Amino acid sequence: MAELFDGVSWAGVVSGAIAAFLLGWLWYSPKLFGAKWAEGVGVRMGAADEMPKAAMGVQVLGLFLVSWLVGVTAVSEALATIILAVVAFSVMGYAGGMFRNNGRYARRVDAGYWLASVVVMVICQGIF
């Protein structure tokens, strides 16, 4: 269990999770890929009466866990492991989008977000 905590840059983990969340906010906004992504997944942007708080909370938790994983792999000098893991899970997410009949553009936007998020998390680990 110690390998999950020893030497981990918690500033890097927290800042990586926050930066990835903010990246997602921009990534899925109408300013970047949001409008066309929404068409591809069959949702209408701005249709919700309120922010999906539960979904956002789970997203923050997931980003924290991935950022923590980046931190653990950075300490053990195994960043290639996280790169492999994220590519693998991005491919699995892409396949899930295919099963849900999401449009190709939407699947690429989702996979691209995960790849970009991990790049941001690795940069945060390097800074902190």
Image: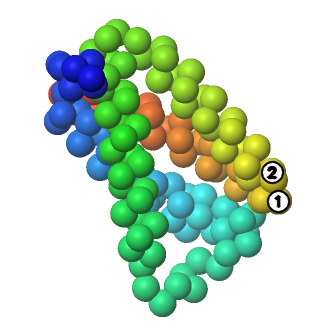
* Residue type at numbered disc 2: Met
- Residue 119 is marked as none
> In which quadrant will I find the N terminus?
top left
Residue 127 appears in the figure:
no
Residue in the image at 27% along x and 18% along y:
3
Residue at 82% of width from left, 59% of height from top? 101
Looking at the rendered structure, the secondary structure element under dot 1 is loop
Name the spot of residue 57 as percent of width and height, x first.
36, 63
Q: Is residue 49 above or below residue 73?
A: below
Q: Secondary structure at mark 2?
A: helix
Q: Is residue 86 left or right of residue 44?
A: left
Left or right, residue 31 beside residue 62: right
Q: Amino acid at mark 1?
A: Asn
The answer to which of 53 and 46 lies nearer the viewer is 53
How far from the left and from the top, in percent, is residue 14? 23, 42
Q: Residue at x 63, y 38 (%)?
A: 90
Residue at the disc numbered 2:
98
Pointer 1: residues within 10 angstroms few (<14), some, or many (20+)? some
Asked whether disc 1 touches disc 2, contact meaning CB atoms under 8 Å apart, the reply is yes
Density class for disc 2 (Cα within 10 Å; few <14, some 14-19, many ≥20) is some
Q: Residue at x 65, y 79 (%)?
A: 44
From the top left corner, tell me how far across and down residue 33 is, in percent.
60, 58
Image color mode: rainbow
In this orientation, does residue 94 appear? yes
Dividing the picture into quarters, in which one does residue 70 lie? top left
Does 18 sit left or right of 81 as displayed? left
Image position of 21 with respect to 87: above or below: below
Residue at the spot of label 1: 101
Residue 122 position in % (x across, y down): 36, 27
